[in-house]
Every structure is written in C-alpha cells, then in structure tokens.
Image (cartoon, grey):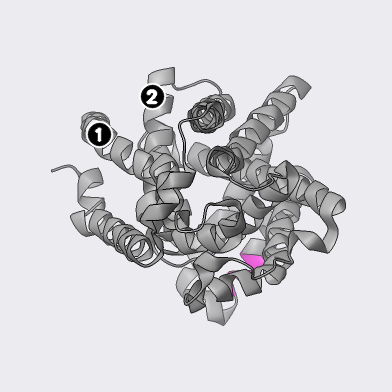
C-alpha cells in the first residue's frame, strides 16, 4: 500500500459517512411526512430546478479546474487537474475544516508540484476564494441589510428540534464569520501583494516567541513561502488576474446556486432569489466552523434551519439529503474512484 493511501485510513471515510447518514436518517424519521409527497409533482419547475443543480455543479467543477490550471501555469493536463480537484474536494469531505489546508498541500505536492509551488497555489486560491465570498456577501448585505441575518421562527419542521432552532437563532451572529473571512482576505492580500518581505520578517519574529517554540521552524518556513509566493505571481499579466477572478466567482457562485436551484425545484411558496441566495452565504459560515469531518451533521442541520420556510412541510430533511448527495456524497464517491489511480501515480513518481 502506498504512503498516500496509508494517510487516508478507512476510519476517515467511515466517520463522516456514518455521521451524515445517521443525522439524515434521524431527521427524515422525525420530520418526514408521507402526505407531504402529494405537494410534489413532476412539473417543468421541478425538472428545471434539478437540471440547474446539475448545471451549476458542472460549472463549479470546470471553473475550479480552470483556475487551478491557471494558478499552476498550466503545468497539469486537464485529466491531472480533474484528479487533483477531485482529491481536493475528497479531502474536504473526510477532514475537519482545520485539517483541510494540510491535506490540500499533500494533494498538490503529490500531483507533481514542488512544495513551494503547492504553497503558492494554495495561498493564491485562498485569497481569491475569500475575496469572492467577501465581495458577494457585502453586496447582499447592501441589498438586504440586517434582514440577511434576521429569520422568523415560523417553520413547522423546526418544532421540537432545539439544535436547529438554536442555529436559526444564532444566524444574526453570522457577521462574526464575515469579519474573520474579511480579515483573512486582507491579511493574504497585504502579505502577497503589498508587503511580502515585511510579512516574512513578521513570521520570523513571532516564531521566536516561547509560546510558539514547538512550531518555530514551521512558522519561519511559512514566512519564507509567503515571500516566494509573492515573487511567483508578481509579474503575471493583467489577463491572468482577470481570468482568475472570473473563474473564482463562477466556481463559488455555482456552489451557492446549487442550494438555490434545489430549493426552487421544490418550493411551494413565493421564491425570492436574493433572499434565498443570501441564506446560503450565512449557511456557508456555519459549515466553515471546524467541527466534524466535511461538516457532516452540521451541514444537514444548518441547511434545514436556515432554509426551512422555502421547503414543503415534512420534506425538509429529504431535500437536505438531496442537497448533500449533490454537494457531498458525489465527491466522496468520486474521490474513492479516483484515489487508487491517483495513489499509483504518486507511488510511480516518488
């Protein structure tokens, strides 16, 4: 067995799957109402919503592949890029948020990039991803104001579910997550594009603090990589930045439009696109909190808590499961399919 497959143990697959399936089964058994199926009809609206779900997933993955090839200087073939983003998404499915960056570095490095190049690609994509989130979130807030965070509790499917009611009640604190992501975006922007050498000296300085003595070499090395990354992309033409920006926005808007498409397919009430889209940005903040691998359990609960009024009563858990099949289980299955071949290639080149 190769080193890469040893690093991805069976329990890393079983834990998120078991949590996700258990939560889905619990929610369906406690929320599902057979009579609610009568409200679902095979209409053009349903077919359009489900088809749009497939379209936005395709757009999301193609844009992800394009920006990864762009940020690596087109050093990977399209097939290699597909394998890499599949393993990237697979890693997000089986690791908690706090472990996602190290796993992604592992994937990039074993996809034929040097360690320095892997760090550069990860940092650049992190900056663009955060920038896209901050910009669209800010626009939505300008359009909706505090209504973006204030939800009524008039959702029958939340009755008796204290955790989901708590999530809905905590939605007005989503701005805290926005501030954290904004801060990360500003830090990365300053570090990479304005003061890379000063950032390097900053990391070298804090690495000398006794509290960080255990991580001294890693922190100092990170400072070196920030400056290397800045030099890597300093002389890129304007067209590069435009293409990266467009690909990033398509990639991330498509992620949120998946939920919007599925909610549109099943909605039986008035459907306000901007309001529903804004809910997905609040939802993303909840699923970004370091909790379970792949945010399993948390994602399903948060999806229902923040979108319940857009779904037929008694079907919210079933629709949440459809959303997770599109956005989570699909990549888990693709990852398990791609993993053996990817691991063989890693072994052959190591």
Q: Front-most of 299 and 89?
A: 299
Q: Name the residue under label 1.
A: 337
One can see residue 106 in this view: no
* Region of the chain picked out in magenta, as a range: 204-208
Q: Nearer the viewer, residue 129 or 228?
A: 129
Q: Where is residue 159 in the image (x, y as percent from the top left)?
A: 51, 74
Q: In which quarter of the image is residue 235?
A: top right
Q: Is residue 337 left or right of residue 109?
A: left
User: Does residue 291 show up?
Assistant: yes
Marks 2 and 1, the one that precedes in the sequence = 2
Indicate which disc residue 163 carries.
none
Q: Which residue is drawn at 37% across and 40% down?
A: 331
Report x, y in % for residue 1.
13, 43
Secondary structure under tag 2 reads helix
Q: Which residue lies furthest to the left in this view?
A: 1
Q: Where is residue 258 in the image (x, y as percent from the top left)?
A: 55, 39
Label 2 to label 1: alpha-carbon separation: 14 Å
Q: Between 239 and 209, which is closer to the camera in this rendering? A: 239
Extreme residue in the bottom direction: 210
- Figure quadrant of residue 12: bottom left
> What residue is drawn where x is 74% and y is 50%?
137
Give how far across and how far down residue 300 sits, in percent: 45, 59
Question: From what the image shows, is residue 113 above or below residue 198?
Answer: above
Which residue is label 2 attached to? 80
Q: Residue at x 71, y 70 (%)?
A: 172
């Amino acid at each position: 067995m190769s080193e890469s497959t040893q690093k991805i143990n069976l329990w890393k697959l079983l834990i998120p799957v078991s949590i996700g399936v258990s939560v889905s089964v619990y929610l369906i058994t406690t929320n599902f109402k057979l009579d609610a199926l009568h409200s679902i009809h095979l209409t053009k609206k349903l077919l359009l919503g489900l088809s749009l779900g497939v379209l936005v997933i395709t757009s999301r993955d193609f844009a992800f592949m394009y920006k990864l090839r762009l940020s690596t200087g087109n050093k990977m073939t399209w097939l290699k890029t597909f394998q890499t983003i599949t393993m990237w998404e697979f890693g997000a499915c089986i690791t908690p948020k706090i472990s996602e960056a190290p796993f992604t570095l592992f994937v990039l490095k074993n996809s034929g990039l040097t360690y320095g190049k892997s760090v550069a690609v990860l940092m650049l994509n992190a900056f663009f991803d955060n920038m896209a989130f901050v910009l669209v979130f800010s626009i939505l807030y300008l359009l909706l104001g505090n209504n973006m965070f204030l939800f009524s509790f008039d959702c029958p499917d939340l009755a008796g579910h204290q955790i989901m009611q708590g999530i809905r009640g905590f939605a007005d604190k989503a701005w805290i997550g926005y501030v954290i992501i904004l801060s990360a975006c500003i830090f990365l922007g300053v570090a990479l594009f304005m003061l890379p050498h000063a950032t390097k000296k900053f990391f070298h300085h804090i690495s000398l603090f006794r509290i960080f003595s255990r991580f001294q070499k890693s922190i100092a090395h990170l400072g070196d990589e920030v400056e290397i990354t800045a030099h890597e992309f300093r002389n890129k033409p304007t067209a590069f930045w435009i293409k990266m920006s467009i690909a990033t926005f398509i990639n991330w808007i498509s992620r949120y439009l998946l939920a919007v498409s599925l909610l549109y397919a099943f909605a039986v009430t008035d459907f306000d696109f901007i309001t529903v889209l804004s809910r997905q940005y609040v939802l993303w903040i909840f699923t970004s909190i370091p909790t379970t691998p792949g945010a399993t359990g948390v994602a399903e609960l948060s999806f229902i808590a923040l979108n319940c009024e857009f779904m037929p009563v008694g079907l919210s858990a079933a629709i949440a499961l459809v959303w997770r099949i599109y956005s989570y289980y699909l990549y888990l299955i693709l990852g398990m399919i791609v993993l053996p071949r990817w691991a063989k290639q890693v072994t052959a080149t190591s």
